[in-house]
Amino acid sequence: MTATVMGYEEALRSFDPVLGLEVHVELSTRSKMFCGCSTAFGAPPNTQTCPVCLGLPGAMPVVNRTAVESAMRIGLALGCSIADWCRFARKNYFYPDMPKNFQTSQYDEPIAFDGFLDVDVDGEPFRVEIERAHMEEDTGKSLHVGGSTGRIHGASHSLLDYNRSGVPLIEIVTKPITGTGARAPEVARAYVEALRDLLRALDVSDVRMEQGSLRCDVNVSLRTDPTQPLGTRTETKNVNSFRSVERSVRYEITRQAALLSEGTAITQETRHWHEDTGTTSPGRSKETAEDYRYFPEPDLVPIAPSREWVEQLRATLPEPPAERRRRLREEWGYSELEMRDVVSSGALDLIEQTVAAGCAPQPARKWWVGELARRANESGTELDALAITPAQVAEVQQLVEAGTVNDKLARQVIEGVLAGEGSPAEVVEGRGLAVVSDDGALGAAVDKAIAANPDVAEKIRGGKVQAAGALIGAVMKEMRGQADAGRVRELILEKLG
Amino acid sequence: MALTTDDVARLAKLARIELSEAELEHLAPQLDVILESVASVQQVAGPDIEPTSHALPLTNVFREDEVRPSLPREDVLAGAPAAEEERFRVPRILGEEA
């Protein structure tokens, strides 16, 4: 069933959108929030559970110190105040994704509150105010069986894997984001991307949306103009890519605008995002929303970070990503567009390390954003998961600059390194890839090319020097790309000059 | 403050406990007595006493981020009412799409 929507421009003429973003971040701690079970992704089902995360009677949780420190570092990086004293709370609900029948979370005492994140929206700065960042735990994973698409509708029963239940989560909640106007979808995306960059710089999470270590719930409401109170909002869940964040905001604006303009009230509800159709559908209605009966968690004592501890953590904060990008762009002499490509392909750290290994910034960028990004894309892996190190990329470039290989051969060297054939020098040796600049071998190939292309040779004799390209191509083909193109050109012109 | 049968019915619903009208009538006054007894503590606690959720004045009890062995899966699933494909099998979940 598809809802009626209004054109986006028309919707923005009649309504002012207000956003609210809730981002859940899975921390990359080794163990879970309240027990020593491993958090490793992809383990066989139900092999990383214990009495604590299964909620067995008598089990006692103890808080993971590193998770608390990560939560505070996230808060500090977002300019938040860190609570002097705060508690965990039980959020009670009956749903089989939590075997305890409650989620351990924080309620009215978050560890961090009142911050902001400055984001870049197509070159324009925009400040997003942060309401709070609190600690909680992840839920198990459900698999719905018997339905046609793995969804609950039509399912006969569900299967639960509790490996993920109890993995530390930080929920970061914005204040209502107003004043975006028509840029609301772009602001939402820019915020989640900036948050991802920040969390990556903090090294507290894998921040992989496709693996669920960064998840976003998108709240949207409309009002007729900015002087009006906030309208009724919907909360769209399951928004699992940056592109979907942008699309879901756009869709909700057009859907709500169509309803409001025909006089229908918006239902406050949870909605689900459908990647394939680019639409949302209603989930649980918040009118009958559960009363979670929050109460302070009796099994966990309060957390009261000393100011010394907070300051120690503040001292570990990395350079803010936006400042670092500005600094590196200037140091490397990249254009805005080049830098944007570098960041979006996830190559910033890799290029920094390649440059540190002695490579000039432009070739480092060319290898990572060109050749290697293409290969990562083809094999469906992340750039930093490729089997080549920044030092090896720098070595490839050194081989190019020394004239040992040309660009084309360098790509074969990279292929060899990725295939596990050793270091770049070893691949050159093993595959026999070095450029031939020996006049004896080149001269023979040049003579052969001239003999095979008498018409081209005649043109060059007649002064059409640019025709030499065709002969260089023939020599290259003959020598499987390993000829020194510059020397080949010189030899051709000497012989036909 | 008297606890009504409506209050108890709502709590029972939240706790997924099915209670008949007769049971509600029976339980509401009993629960009310319990609440009143607990509330008597408030007569002793003056404004100088902070509300507390914990018996001991402890804060900052942590464990280091170290992995400890998990339970063997056979033991884990032995406690499940039903298991399938190494997972806990539960009745279908109504009312929400995941």
Image (cartoon, coloured by chain):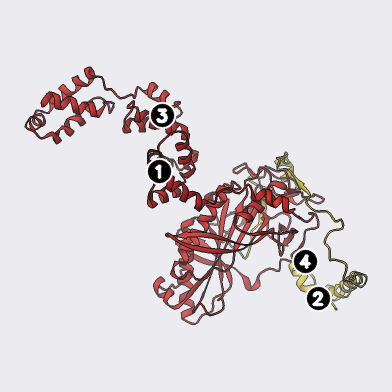
Chain colours: A red, B yellow
Say which quadrant the C terminus of chain A sits in. Answer: top left
What residue is rendered at 72% in x and 50% in y? Answer: A309
Q: Is there one chain holding both mark 3 and mark 2? A: no
Q: Are marks 4 and 3 in contact (CB under 8 Å)?
A: no
Element assignment for label 1:
helix
Residue A166 visible, this orientation:
no
Left or right position of A276 against A62: left
What residue is rendered at 48% in x and 65% in y? Answer: A249
Q: Position of residue A65 (x, y in %)?
A: 72, 47
Q: Is there one chain holding both mark 2 and mark 4? A: yes
Q: Are marks 3 and 2 in contact (CB under 8 Å)?
A: no
In this view, the mark in front (3 or 2): 3
What residue is rendered at 85% in x and 78% in y? Answer: B2
In this view, the mark in front (3 or 1): 1
Q: Is there one chain holding both mark 3 and mark 1? A: yes
In this view, the mark in front (4 or 3): 3
Task: Measure the alpha-carbon separation of dots 3 and 2.
Answer: 77 Å
Q: Dot 4 corresponds to which residue?
A: B17
Label total for image: 4
Q: Dot 2 corresponds to which residue?
A: B21
What's the mark number on residue A394? Answer: none
What's the mark number on residue A416? Answer: 3
Q: Is there one chain holding both mark 4 and mark 1? A: no
- Identity of the amino acid at label 3? Gly
Task: Measure the alpha-carbon separation of dots 2 and 1.
Answer: 70 Å
Residue A439 visible, this orientation:
yes
Q: Dot 1 corresponds to which residue?
A: A369
Q: Chain of mark 2?
A: B
- Identity of the amino acid at label 4? Ile
Q: Image quadrant of residue B50? A: bottom right
Q: Residues within 10 Å of mark 4 (few under 14, many from 20)?
A: few
